[in-house]
Image (spheres, rainbow, N blue to C red):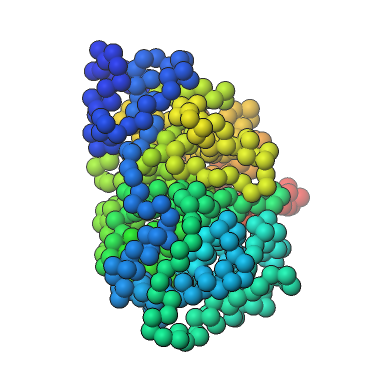
Amino acid sequence: MISISPFLAKHKDLKRPLKDDIPGSQERHSTSQRIAFNQGPLTNLSEEDKILFEQFGQGPIVKAPYACIHHAFESQAQHQPDATAVIHQGDSITYEALNRQANRLARKLISLGVQPGDSIALFLQRSIPMVVGIMASLKCGASYAPQHVGVAPESQLEFVLSATSAKVILTLSQFKDLIPPSPELPVIAIDEEMGIPFESDQSFRENLSVDVQTENTCFILFTSGTTGNPNGVQVTHKNVCNILLTSPGNLGMQPGLKVSQILSIAFDMAAWEILGCLGNGATLLIRGKNIQEAVEQVDIVIATPSILGTIDTAKCQHIQVAAVAGEPCPKPLADEWSSFSTFFNSCGPTETTIINTAQNYTASTSGLTIGSPTPNNTVYILDANRQPCAIGEVGEMWAGGDCVSAGYLHNDALNEERYVPDPFLGEGRVMFRTRDLGRWTSNGELEHFGRTDDQVKIRGFRVELDSISNTIEQVPGCTQAVTLKLNNRNLVSFIRPASVNIEAAKEAVASSLPYYCVPEFILTMDQFPKTSRGKVDKRNLLEQAKAFQSTQLQTTELAEVVK
């Protein structure tokens, strides 16, 4: 537990929660705009910690300007019809043209029986028609379930169709042959529809008057999952507008700026790129095969740390804002990007709508954290019995507020385990169990300590894998490190680039952490393998480690025979 006694001593005379007296609170809250937590669940805390638990645990109260994300886009189309909305490999489309195409496709979907609350399968690849399909789905009140055709196996596509009870499949003409046979479902090639000339210059200029509610599902994303079928997470318009149309989630997106679209369309951060950009009036630049080439042309980039780490920053000094999420961010990466851009390190699972905490990291920042709760959201650090942890104690992060999604499709048991009544907000609100470990710093930011399943036992001792990786990342030249459990006695670490001194890395761990934290061996490489969602592929790394271990064992056995 970290000590905060000097800080608390300054406020020892507090008799009531005067939150604005606490350093830094002026920026995050105003006296009239904060949530009063129910005090009943806080009885195990000291009076000082009760104050800080409530103060630190909530973002500012901010009203999103729109209740549905496509309404924000429609407003942009009305106010800047000739502005470029999307660019992809030399082609482009204006806001007005995109809106008209989406209106036409939405009306066709409705003619096929699509109603508010239905789901539409979006089986395609990055393209301008992809964006038309997204907006058309939302305009008719349906949610979209995106899958990257050519990457997702047919069995995955079949599962998504079944789980979502999709009414229509939207795709591109070139991928029709990759769509699973579904005789009962209409299959529409969006690019073919877009190629049909409008009857007149006024055709489909009027937006649809479908009654779409803020609680309606906006999209359904399927978590990657390590066992069994993936879980479909239902994210509402309210969830989406809350993070994408307020600061810092909007990342300063505005007309005149370009935002890259480089991530998998099946990944929740792609919604940050696409819907965030078009809801705020910026221009979306969709990448081709070359990520570097796309990033060099934009002002705002959103990525996982693994992907951002592959970018040559010497050619990207013009970037105004960079944001990462999805996995731990190495401090060297944050230091590099924050030296020339506004840099956000963020955190949040799909179930809490893209991100629910963020830190604006700068060179003068005391340390790299995942920041504080985003607007209208809460974070609680709780123990195994769901009791509040004292400030500075490590516990599990639970998320509350407007970020909490509508739950998993057809999985009541998991919903009951992960989505539970929020005792701090009450009034029927729900909080989500993130399974991330964290603690509050003395200035109200969250330090991330990995996943609960990243806490492993080695030789009977509990070990936090991220703490080992963070230590290795302090070694000169190391840009990223990953540590995994090899067996019950040994750990293995991976570092990049390949030029990093392995012995220096081992010594760094040995000199600052207990002996059982020192990796059995360390593998270096210039790039880590990545999943289709742009995160470090830990399964692949572990397979490489086991192969290396097997080779080492065979070499040792051969040496013994030769003796």
Foreground residue among 259 and 420: 420
Tell whether 30 sits left or right of 429.
left
Foreground residue among 496 and 133: 133
- Residue 191 appears at what percent x and percent y? 52, 80
- Residue 374 appears at what percent x and percent y? 37, 42
Q: Is residue 513 visible?
A: no
Image quadrant of residue 152?
bottom right
- Residue 295 appears at what percent x and percent y? 37, 67
Tell whether 540 sits left or right of 322.
right
Q: Going by the picture, which residue comes out furthest to the right?
A: 561
Residue drawn at (31%, 46%), measured in percent from left and top?
A: 360
Number of disc labels: 0
Q: Is 138 above or below relative to 30?
A: below
Residue drawn at (60%, 54%), measured in percent from left and top?
A: 222
Residue drawn at (61%, 52%), measured in percent from left and top?
A: 232
Foreground residue among 518 and 381: 381
Q: Is residue 462 visible?
A: yes
- Residue 188 appears at what percent x and percent y? 60, 75
Q: Is 429 above or below relative to 140?
A: above
Foreground residue among 77 and 351: 77
Residue drawn at (50%, 48%), measured in percent from left and top?
A: 215
For the N terminus, the quadrant is top left
